[in-house]
């Protein structure tokens, strides 16, 4: 109907019939994650509709739908493809709407230099690059890190926050030590290597990461 009949109020159709369309999806989701909610089921339903439209060269984001469908709360492509990878599942557990609001609030508080650094990092997150934030204590480097994390995680992307010590890692959202994240041996010698096998679940998660701080 959405693809071939061009309804005048597609969002109204969704609002009226969404519970019927998605009546069995909550059961499907709870087989993977018992904590799944009705909101997750409705979000998954929208994803399935969008996936079907994409096979026909369309999308719920197309102009013809007038923005009447809400954006996905979850990156379903990544979650479903990797739902058995506990490392990826852990990185996708964040509340995307809450993080989006947090990111917007933090961006409003940035000075010009922080905003420039933030924009540059976000723009390169999917294309590769290396950035170094330099400044004395109290200049807001950690604030920028947190804003970047919130922005990208709100988009359903994986951001890994690592630090050399446990104390420093606590300053970053979801932070961990580099030794823990990358399996760096202790003590570390010139010939030491990380104990991450090429085809492991952890290696797969690292490859899926959009940003490492």
Image (cartoon, rainbow, N blue to C red):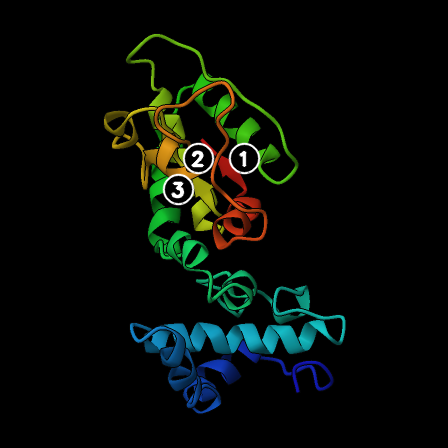
- Residue 1 vs 80, above or below: the answer is below
Q: CA distance from mark 1 to mark 3?
A: 11 Å
Residue identifier under label 1 = 122
Residue 59 found in image quarter: bottom right
The numbered dot on residue 148 is 2
Near mark 1 (Cα within 10 A), the count class, few <14, some 14-19 or many ≥20, is some
Q: Position of residue 211 (x, y in %)?
A: 51, 37
Whether label 1 touches label 2, CB < 8 Å: yes
Q: Quadrant of residue 8?
A: bottom right
Q: Are marks 3 and 2 in contact (CB under 8 Å)?
A: yes
Q: Earlier in the sequence, mark 1 or mark 2?
A: 1
**Quadrant, the N terminus:** bottom right
As drawn, the label of residue 36 is: none
**Residue at the (66%, 37%) spot, across then down:** 127
Question: Can you say whether 69 is above or below 194 in the image?
Answer: below
Horizontal side of 138 relative to 156 (left or right) equals left
Percent position of residue 3, x then y: 71, 81
Under tag 1, what secondary structure? helix
Q: Residue at x 58, y 47 (%)?
A: 198
Name the residue carrying label 3: 150
Label 3 and label 2: CA atoms lie apart by 5 Å
| Nearer-the-camera pick, 40 or 174 | 174
**Which residue is at a point 63% across and 73% down the rendered structure image?**
51
Q: Considering the numbered disc 3 on the image, is that residue within a helix, a strand or a loop?
A: helix
Q: Relative to 10, does residue 140 appear above or below in the rendering?
A: above
- Label 2 sits on a secondary structure element that is helix
Crowd tier of the residue under label 2, counting other residues whose Cα lies within 10 Å: few below 14, some 14–19, many 20 or above? many
User: How many badges with numbers are in the image?
Assistant: 3
Q: Quadrant of the C terminus?
A: top left
Write the residue at 35% across / 54% down.
94
State how far apart marks 1 and 2 are (Cα).
7 Å
């Amino acid at each position: 109907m959405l693809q071939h009949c061009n309804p005048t109020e597609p969002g109204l159709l969704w609002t009226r019939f969404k519970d019927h369309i998605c009546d069995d999806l909550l059961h499907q989701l709870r087989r993977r994650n018992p904590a799944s909610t009705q909101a997750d089921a409705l979000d998954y339903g929208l994803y399935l509709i969008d996936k079907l439209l994409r096979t026909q060269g369309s999308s719920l984001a197309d102009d013809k739908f007038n923005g009447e469908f809400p954006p996905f709360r979850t990156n379903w492509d990544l979650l479903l493809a990797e739902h058995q990878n506990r490392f990826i599942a852990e990185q996708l557990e964040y509340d995307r709407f809450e993080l989006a609001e947090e990111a917007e609030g933090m961006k409003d508080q940035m000075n010009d230099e922080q905003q420039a650094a933030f924009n540059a990092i976000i723009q390169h997150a999917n294309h590769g690059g290396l950035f170094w934030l330099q400044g004395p204590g109290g200049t807001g480097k950690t604030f920028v890190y947190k804003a970047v994390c919130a922005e990208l995680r709100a988009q359903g992307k994986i951001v890994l926050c690592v630090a050399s010590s446990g104390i420093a890692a606590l300053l970053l959202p979801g932070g961990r030590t580099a030794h823990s994240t990358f399996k760096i041996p202790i003590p570390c010698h010139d010939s030491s290597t990380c104990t991450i096998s090429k085809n492991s679940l952890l290696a797969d998660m690292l490859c899926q990461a959009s940003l490492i701080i």
